[in-house]
Image (cartoon, coloured by chain):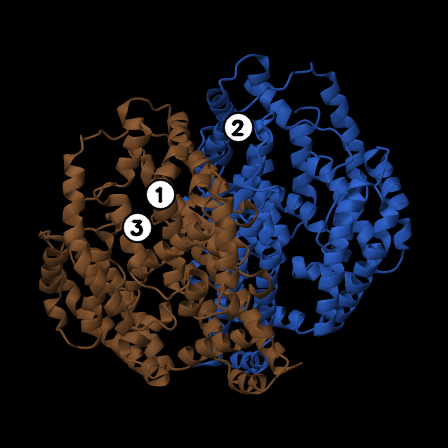
Chain colours: A blue, B brown
Amino acid sequence: MTAYSDLSTHFGRASALGNAVGILQWDSDVMMPKGAAGTRAESMALLRVMHHGMITDARIGDWLADADADHDLGPWERANLREIRRLWTVETALPSDLVEASSKAISACEMKWRQARAEADFAGLLPYLAEVLSIQREIGAAKGERLGLSAYDALLNDYEPGGRSAKIDLLFDDLADFLPGFTHEVLAVQGKRPQVADPQGPFAIEKQRALGLRMMAALGYDFERGRLDVSTHPFCGGADNDVRITTRYDEGDFAKALMGVLHETGHALYEQGRPQGFLNQPVGTARGMSLHESQSLLVEMQACRSQEFIAFAAPLMRETFGGSGPAWETDALWRRYTRVEPGFIRVDADEVTYPAHVILRYRLEKALIADAMPLSELPAAWNAGMKDLLGVTVPDDKLGCLQDVHWPSGGWGYFPTYTLGAMTAAQIFEAACTAAPDILPAIGRGDFSGLLSWLRSNIHSQGSLLETDDLLTQATGRPLDAGAFKAHLRKRYGGEG
Amino acid sequence: MTAYSDLSTHFGRASALGNAVGILQWDSDVMMPKGAAGTRAESMALLRVMHHGMITDARIGDWLADADADHDLGPWERANLREIRRLWTVETALPSDLVEASSKAISACEMKWRQARAEADFAGLLPYLAEVLSIQREIGAAKGERLGLSAYDALLNDYEPGGRSAKIDLLFDDLADFLPGFTHEVLAVQGKRPQVADPQGPFAIEKQRALGLRMMAALGYDFERGRLDVSTHPFCGGADNDVRITTRYDEGDFAKALMGVLHETGHALYEQGRPQGFLNQPVGTARGMSLHESQSLLVEMQACRSQEFIAFAAPLMRETFGGSGPAWETDALWRRYTRVEPGFIRVDADEVTYPAHVILRYRLEKALIADAMPLSELPAAWNAGMKDLLGVTVPDDKLGCLQDVHWPSGGWGYFPTYTLGAMTAAQIFEAACTAAPDILPAIGRGDFSGLLSWLRSNIHSQGSLLETDDLLTQATGRPLDAGAFKAHLRKRYGGEG
């Protein structure tokens, strides 16, 4: 055996273990009876410890050194070594007592957060969140020391390999300059239009599910390697060759479940399109969270809130639910799915105001990790930011800084990937439609094959062969900038929309 | 840490891994899209190898020796050591190349069997089955040498710890003497009765499911620690505190799904009633397959084909399906669920003729493992046995010796537990009804609490504290004999039935 094949076998086993965890996590969220929570937590903790043990195996360093000297390796194998080294470097950076302390602090904080959010009680959460933050700083420092990065960039790197806050600052500052004024403009345009009523339910869940399945099939989702189910929060999960998505149904509004399905289908198409020959290797995984989010938003926002898509989907919606009248007109439905309205809650935000929610969180978490702001000042800073970026006055912390689970659950450095994903989606979709001009007209006929084929070749099948910037440059001609996203928003929502 | 607590921690971890495998197996049978089969097989093989590694860990021998000398242990801890030693002794008896050879031979044989059964082609299966048999003999010999048992008893021991063929011979010979004549008698009695038509479908699956759930609830199944789903073959599986059952629905006959639910609920009540304090330890597991099957048959056959149960269930059946007329009369339904009819297929057999199917398989597999009969003579021996025990002439091997997956899949030594379970069920139910005479009348009112309470105290909560004979003696006053089972059959099916 060569050192490379030792590594490949070893990481294939780690992947088999990761796949088991993926299915168990899916089951926890979708199927598990609640009395099994404790038993399940023990199984998953054990498998995660075993997985961590595998990717920090003492032999990996030697294997990597030997494999680096192997001149018979092709570009995929070389890239696989790079990704293995990346994983191993980060995973071996943390002392195990820090991992354990983090896990305990997160469990306690998440539990407290559920209560604190319900009671809008930031003061109650503060000591728990301070503990999580303090440990996140330590984790960032430990990883950063190994990687030569600041603590925040080291945390960001876990979600967005190669991502740097200096670059995100530029991109987000650009957007933050643009968005408040643009949002005013959009609201003015929309305000002048006649109001249209929403379609009235109830919309039977079975019919909503049938519509979702039909859209998934149209998009090219492979049902032999996945499923659609229900969970409290929609997600895409599962395992290699078993890419499962979920949605949730509201009998009063079928758009929620449908848009959830479209979004998660975008994630799933990426997962289903990863390179089969390297599916169980680090180089075969998705390139990072920004790219992943770009694929969901490309489907949900770029493709499926277009006038073309609604022209295709509106008759199916009318047929599915027996809808008729002004609210069911194609144009009315399109206006509904592109309605802009500043609000307090990130997950309910539209495409135009969403980035403001993210930019605020990004700036705050960066300051908190750098210890440039006391955690006790978070609510005041949050509310000032919301006023500044969105023009809204947050009434309490439940609708403010307590709304998201990310910080209590240790997901520091994750938030920026949402908006990087939105910008990436716009840039990729623009490139795809330029390269294959029939993509949008075909979507109007319910034919997504041109889009999927372009994405398969240029994004999905590339796995982690290239770094993010290089992949985006190869696919779109340049690294990420805000241009395509701003142009998209202007076109869809500006005066001419 | 004492040696006992080391062992307890270690086997708790093995249990957490086993629970993960249990959920993944459930998912494979109930949820998994077919394109994931290869990926899943890799994950499960890895986890099983890890599990095997844990229960054959080199430290266990020393821990056991030290723990044996620990005088502070109570009876449950002592019994736990006995069960740990039992597991460890058996699992360390096999060289790993034999485990691997067995796994490969079984995979090949199972695949061939699906085709051979469809084509009634025993000759085609013969070389594959011969390989499995030969390896089973080796496994039996290796385990037998360690345990001081014959090869067959060593195989049996995996399913029925402490079980011995010398004892089974006596029990089964007793039944084999009784059953052919008794079956004739039953057929004569039933033949004199007027024929009653079966309820006519279609029976909507949703209604069948609702009826099943209602019965599970009545029986005392805990839905916070389990689920009801659909699979090709009904089973009870899952994990500790997560005991999931399945059934399958036939729109033309609601009894199939219902009886499947009742049977699997019996298994599930046992699993849900195991001792919480030792749930993740060997001593907390079910006592063996005969006891397990006794719990399913006690519910399905003893309790739920009684006239009392049908008196309770018949109105619910009529209400659920809107049934009326002669086929839906309580007495007609009872006669239908206790109809006796000799046939070729074990899984379709009634309570009276089922043991003949098992006794035949038991005698044949014992002879084959002992090399007392050439495998090529299996079809002829099978058909002769069916003629002798059941009076039927097998038309081909599809309806004969190719019908069951057990032998191709390496399950040699399993078959006798079905009929041991039926006999055990009769003996336990008799003891329960003697101790608590209201059990059957209460079932007639849909109240199973008396039965469940007795089973919880006397069987379920005992886990593997005692050996099978001792548990049965404690619960019923004597080790297993055929008396209660024969008395039950005479009472339900004999002239006075």
Asked which secondary structure carries label 1, the reply is helix
Q: What is the number of the mark on residue B488?
A: 3
Seen from the viewer's position, the closer of residues B34 and A385 is B34
Seen from the viewer's position, the closer of residues B107 and A58 is B107
On-image quarter of the N terminus of chain B: bottom right
Subunit under mark 3: B
User: Depth-wise, is mark 2 or mark 1 nearer the camera?
Assistant: 1
**As shown in the figure, which amino acid type bears the numbered disc 3?**
His
Subunit under mark 2: A
Residue located beneath label 2 in the image: A308
For residue A277, say whether it is visible. Answer: yes
**Residue at far top of view:** A325
Residue located beneath label 1 in the image: B259
On-image quarter of the C terminus of chain B: top left
Subunit under mark 1: B
| Quadrant of the image occupied by residue A46 | bottom right
Query: Is label 1 in contact with label 3 (beta carbons under 8 Å)?
Result: no
Give the alpha-carbon distance from disc 2 to disc 1, as whole Å: 53 Å
Assess disc 2: are there few (<14), some (14-19) or many (≥20) residues with their C-alpha within 10 Å of its C-alpha: some
x and y, in percent, of residue A286 in the image? 55, 56
In this rendering, position of residue A24 left or right of residue B1 = left
User: Depth-wise, is mark 1 or mark 3 nearer the camera?
Assistant: 3
Q: What is the number of the mark on residue A313?
A: none
Assess disc 1: are there few (<14), some (14-19) or many (≥20) residues with their C-alpha within 10 Å of its C-alpha: some
In this rendering, position of residue B154 left or right of residue A337 = left
**As shown in the figure, which amino acid type bears the numbered disc 1?**
Met
Does A170 appear above or below A298?
A: below
x and y, in percent, of residue B185 in the image? 15, 46
x and y, in percent, of residue A423 in the image? 66, 44
Asked which secondary structure carries label 2, the reply is helix
